[in-house]
């Protein structure tokens, strides 16, 4: 049944377009043009973000920062293996997936750290990527409180991921 959902909606759009005498193909191509323009507007911010992430990881700064905040995170009950994931997750989804894969390769997926990493990947957002994309498309220059509140939500997600795993799965 689920194989027919998308074709059904495509057919429904075509039928409604025919009934209302709308040039469905013309509307589709106009939408594609607008999407392409939006992608071009966002591209410089994405290139800068990806370059910064690559430089951050290659410089060794991720390891230095992880070691520096390790005493604080241990007080919160946050596994040391997940610190690099918590640092990179707000910035890069693909970088976070690489760190996540590394964590699961180093420890068991059923370990405390593996479970916490899984919860983090599933429940937090790539904050700066999202802000860059959405604010880039809408041409908003000042993000005001969006970055701070989003990072606070990420931090809450990191801390609660460890707490939730400890309460429910350990």
Image (cartoon, grey):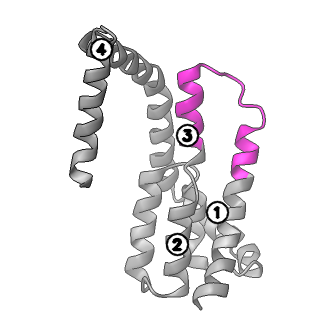
SS for tag 1?
A: helix
| Residue in view at x 60 percent, y 28 percent | 135
Are the residues tagged 3 and 1 within 8 Å (C-beta)?
no
Whole-number angstrom distance, CA of label 4 to CA of label 1: 61 Å
* Whether residue 143 is situated above or below residue 153 in the rendered picture: above
What residue is disc 4 on?
19
Q: Pointer 3: residues within 10 angstroms few (<14), some, or many (20+)?
A: some
Rendered location of residue 165, percent (x, y):
61, 81
Whole-number angstrom distance, CA of label 4 to CA of label 3: 38 Å
Dot in front, 3 or 1 = 3
Q: Can residue 59 be seen in this view?
A: yes
What residue is disc 1 on?
65
Is 139 magenta? The answer is: yes
Q: Which of marks 3 and 2 is nearer the N terminus?
A: 2
Are the residues tagged 4 and 2 within 8 Å (C-beta)?
no
Whole-number angstrom distance, CA of label 2 to CA of label 1: 18 Å
Q: Report the span colored magenta.
A: 128-151
């Amino acid at each position: 049944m689920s194989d027919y959902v998308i074709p059904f909606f495509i057919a429904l759009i075509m039928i409604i377009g025919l009934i209302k005498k709308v040039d469905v193909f013309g509307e589709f191509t106009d939408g594609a043009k607008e999407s392409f323009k939006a992608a071009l507007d966002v591209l410089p911010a994405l290139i800068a973000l990806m370059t910064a992430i690559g430089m951050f990881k290659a410089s060794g700064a991720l390891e230095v920062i992880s070691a520096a905040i390790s005493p604080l995170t241990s007080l919160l009950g946050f596994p040391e293996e997940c610190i690099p994931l918590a640092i990179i997750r707000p910035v890069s989804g693909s970088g976070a997936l690489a760190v996540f894969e590394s964590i699961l390769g180093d420890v068991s997926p059923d370990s405390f750290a593996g479970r916490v990493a899984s919860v983090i990947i599933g429940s937090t957002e790539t904050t700066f990527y999202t802000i860059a994309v959405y604010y880039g498309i809408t041409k908003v220059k000042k993000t005001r409180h969006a970055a701070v509140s989003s990072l606070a939500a990420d931090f809450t997600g990191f801390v609660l991921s460890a707490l939730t795993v400890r309460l429910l799965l350990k």
